[in-house]
């Protein structure tokens, strides 16, 4: 069942609607703006909420076999680099509030989850697989893009690049 859901989500992420090709967000590009909510309904706007701050934008889902362990590793790096100004957001691609809330509670991480129930944000960012992580500098420029699983050391190197 999870494999089937993964296939469906991958197809949804790949489909951008209409005749437009998926976004190809790469290093050096300006990170697209978006509006969404936290699972509790609190509205969030990027880049306004993080203006002038480096940010890690992480796309994930609870069925992603690499996401759980990696999100715990991200928490370790986040705690070390938060005093230097690093923020992390975890955008859930394609799942509902209950699923997101339960998974984040299970993980016990302190960075916020954001909702993307219809994968609209993921499409704007060109996400084609999970996990995908963008490291955005204080000017809103993508400095590093990680597709797939990354260990704690790789994640920290990328985060330090965004902090430069």
Image: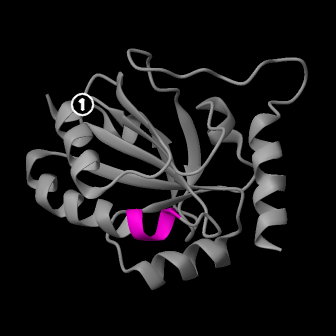
* Residue identified by numbered label 1: 52
The residue positioned 12% from the left and 59% from the top of the image is 80
Q: Is residue 71 above or below residue 160?
A: below
Work out whether residue 156 or residue 110 is closer to the camera in this orientation and state it. 156
Q: Is residue 96 above or below residue 128?
A: below
The residue positioned 32% from the left and 55% from the top of the image is 151
Give left or right: position of 131 versus 156: right
Please state the extent of the stretch shown in magenta in the rendering.
Answer: 66-70
Percent x, y for residue 143? 32, 25
Give left or right: position of 23 versus 40: right
Q: Residue furthest right?
A: 18
The residue positioned 39% from the left and 35% from the top of the image is 48
Q: Is residue 5 above or below residue 153?
A: below
Give left or right: position of 2 versus 71: right
Q: Is residue 131 above or below residue 17?
A: below
Magenta residues, dominant SS class = helix
Verify whether residue 83 appears in magenta. no
């Amino acid at each position: 069942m999870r494999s089937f859901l993964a296939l469906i989500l991958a197809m949804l992420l790949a489909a951008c609607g209409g005749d437009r090709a998926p976004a190809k967000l790469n290093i050096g590009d300006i990170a697209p703006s978006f509006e969404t909510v936290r699972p509790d309904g609190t509205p969030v706007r990027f880049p306004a909420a993080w203006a002038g701050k480096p940010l890690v934008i992480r796309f994930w889902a609870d069925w992603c076999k690499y996401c759980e362990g990696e999100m715990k590793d991200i928490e370790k790096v986040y705690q070390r680099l938060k005093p230097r100004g690093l923020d992390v957001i975890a955008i859930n691609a394609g799942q509902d509030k209950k699923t997101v809330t339960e998974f984040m509670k299970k993980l016990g991480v302190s960075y916020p989850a954001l909702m993307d129930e219809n994968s609209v944000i993921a499409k704007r960012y060109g996400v084609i697989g999970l996990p995908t992580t963008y490291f955005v500098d204080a000017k809103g420029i993508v400095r590093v893009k990680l597709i797939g699983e990354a260990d704690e050391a790789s994640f920290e190197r990328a985060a330090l690049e965004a902090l430069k």
